[in-house]
Image: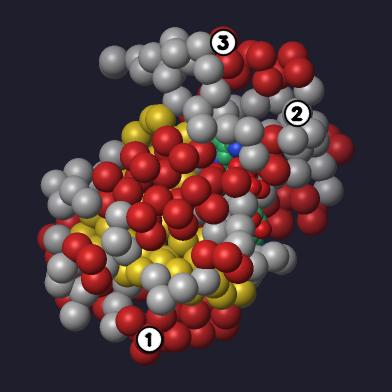
């Protein structure tokens, strides 16, 4: 069960979104069976096939997360790769940010991945395999005006990833955080042209990254069993060495 590449199972959250759809296609194209969890909308029904299983999931709901994992395990035997991709932003200067905006962003971007990880980890430990990929953001490192809730959630997600990598490495399970560069997705449609240009200039490659390229990178990463506890940037930004 799940021992060959073609039979591997990936569970992707936020699967109807810009990066999520690209992830579903990329994992399916690589031979994975994909549990594609959408929230308000289901992932593209055209994708429904023996290989892709669209499901509805609010990652902030522990009961729904628990049900989703047991359904996937019943249907396909186990989850090899969890991609915590669901994410939201609600930008405001801190003084104008209300409790709901703070709580919701932290709930989706940080508590959701915690719930999903907690639910898949026992069976990954039992099977001595697995890869967890958490979609973070460069805002975690640099912060951003009006982005305190988003930055805190993504910095927390990186901390969660590094801690979990240490807890699970001994069981052969890898945990990594991936930082995509600026992508044109529903999340970024409202962004003004000046900020969009700044993102483009921040990359030495001089361009935004396409979701499909981030998705293919994540598929490749999921296939490695000796890369764990890393924060990997797919954004063309030059890293500081020290
Ligand atoms: N777009 C960018 O430039 C960019 C850059 C860095 C990181 N990211 C991160 O990439 C990930 C994907 O973002 P995207 O750009 O595709 O945005 P998107 O808005 O297209 O997709 C996000 C998805 O998350 C889902 N979602 C929201 N609340 C949910 C919940 N409670 N439960 C389950 N799913 C929920 C939404 O329905 C949506 O489909 C996010 O984690 C985001 O923070 C995006």
Q: Which is more N-terminal, label 3 or label 1? A: 1
Circle on res. 75: 1
Circle on res. 238: none
Mark 2 and mark 3: Cα distance apart in space: 15 Å
Front-most of 145 and 49?
A: 49
Q: Residue at 32% of width from left, 49% of height from top?
A: 219
Q: Which is more N-terminal, label 3 or label 2? A: 2
Classify residue 31 by image quadrant. bottom left
Mark 1 and mark 3: Cα distance apart in space: 46 Å
Instruction: Tell me the SS state at disc 1.
Output: helix
Instruction: Tell me the SS state at disc 2.
Output: loop
**Residue located farthest toward the right when viewing the structure as drawn:** 96
Q: Residue at 24% of width from left, 71% of height from top?
A: 7
Residue 162: x %, y % from top left: 32, 47
70 is higher (above) or lower (below) than 39: below
* Residue placed under numbered mark 3 in the picture: 201
Instruction: Tell me the SS state at disc 3.
Output: helix
Q: How many marks?
A: 3
In-image side of 165 versus 178 (left or right): left
* Residue placed under numbered mark 2 in the picture: 191
1 and 3 marks in contact (CB < 8 Å): no
Q: Which is more N-terminal, label 1 or label 2? A: 1
Q: Nearer the viewer, mark 1 or mark 3?
A: 1
């Amino acid at each position: 069960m799940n021992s060959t590449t073609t039979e591997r199972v990936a569970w992707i959250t936020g699967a109807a979104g810009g990066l999520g759809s690209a992830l579903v296609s990329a994992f399916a194209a690589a031979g994975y069976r994909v549990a594609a969890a959408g929230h308000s909308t289901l992932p593209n029904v055209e994708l429904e096939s023996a290989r892709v299983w669209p499901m509805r999931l609010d990652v902030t709901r522990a009961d729904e997360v628990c049900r989703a994992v047991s359904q996937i395990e019943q249907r396909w035997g186990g989850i090899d790769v969890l991609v915590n991709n669901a994410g939201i932003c609600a930008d405001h200067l801190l003084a104008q940010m209300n409790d709901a905006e703070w709580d919701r962003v932290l709930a989706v971007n940080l508590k959701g991945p915690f719930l999903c990880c907690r639910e898949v980890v026992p069976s990954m430990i039992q099977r001595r395999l697995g890869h967890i990929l958490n979609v973070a953001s460069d805002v975690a490192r640099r912060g951003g005006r009006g982005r305190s809730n988003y930055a805190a959630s993504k910095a927390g997600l990186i901390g969660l990833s590094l801690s979990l990598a240490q807890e699970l490495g001994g069981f052969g399970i890898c945990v990594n955080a991936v930082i995509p560069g600026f992508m044109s997705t529903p999340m970024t449609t409202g962004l003004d042209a000046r900020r969009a240009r700044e993102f483009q200039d921040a990359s030495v490659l001089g361009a935004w990254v396409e979701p499909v390229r981030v998705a293919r990178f994540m598929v490749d990463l999921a296939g490695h069993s000796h890369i764990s506890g890393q924060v990997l940037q797919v954004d063309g930004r030059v890293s500081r060495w020290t």
